[in-house]
Amino acid sequence: MPTYRDEVVVLRTHKLGEADRIVTLLSRRHGKVRAVAKGIRRTSSRFGSRLEPFMVADVLLYQGRSLDIVQQAESLGSYGTQIVGDYDRYTAANAMVEAADRLSDAEATPAQYLLLLGGLRALANGDHASRSILDSYLLRVMTLSGWAPALADCARCGRPGPHAHFVAQLGGMVCTNCAPAGGVRVAEGTLELLRSLVAGEWEIIDAASPRDTGSASGLIAAYTQWHLERGIRSLDHVGGGS
């Protein structure tokens, strides 16, 4: 079909010419989509602010050769307003959409869309600490993308855990025999928190100590950036605030 309709989250935008923008969208049914929103930068644009980063919209698109064309856009969730007004939420949201952009393609699953949507909604509502929402999102989207970290058995030899060392390059927790010299030793509370972040056990996550939260965030950032090779630039600006 030359035209199609879908629900989307706006990941990023780029200027095109004097009045247009290229918008990168994560859609519910069509994976990642790059499309042109014509005239969006004019004050009289029919799109208004419905195609800004972190916004959720119902869009009608025309299928083009290299870029699709946005024909209609109706707002489904205006999370951008609550997010951009708070530094911690804003930086966490940027890291989330950057990760989604890097991990998604035309074959992205509805689960990836729903995970990002839920994360942005939680940030906008201030349901939990922004860094915890980001950490949970990163672990879960990596799992959906086939890069689940080993948090029980040794990532290298499969020896049953629990184990005490985390090595991003090897895929997660490793036993003493497989741990390289200088490997990061993980406290029991940090390991429990990592498992809770994957499972979405928010009572445990919210009650975690600042030490375990900080340690888990560092491990998650290292693990994510190692597997994405070029890393997520937005993580450099993320703090640990609420």
Image (tube, grey):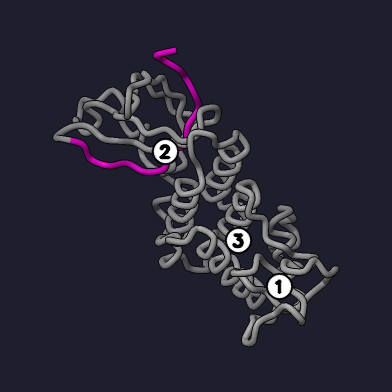
- Camera-nearest label, 1 or 3: 1
User: What is the span of residues highlighted in magenta in the rendered image?
Assistant: 1-16
Q: Quadrant of residue 86?
A: bottom left
Question: Circle 3 sits in a helix, a strand or a loop, which is it?
Answer: helix
Residue 158 lies left or right of residue 55; in this view the side is right
Which amino acid is tagged 2? Val
Which amino acid is tagged 1? Thr
Q: Which mark is residue 78?
A: none
Earlier along the polypeptide chain: callout 2 or callout 3? 2
Which amino acid is tagged 3? Ser
Q: Is residue 111 located in the magenta-colored stretch of the structure?
A: no
Can residue 233 be seen? yes
Name the residue that disc number 3 marks: 132
Name the residue that disc number 2 marks: 10
Residue 238 lies left or right of residue 242; in this view the side is left
Earlier along the polypeptide chain: callout 1 or callout 2? 2
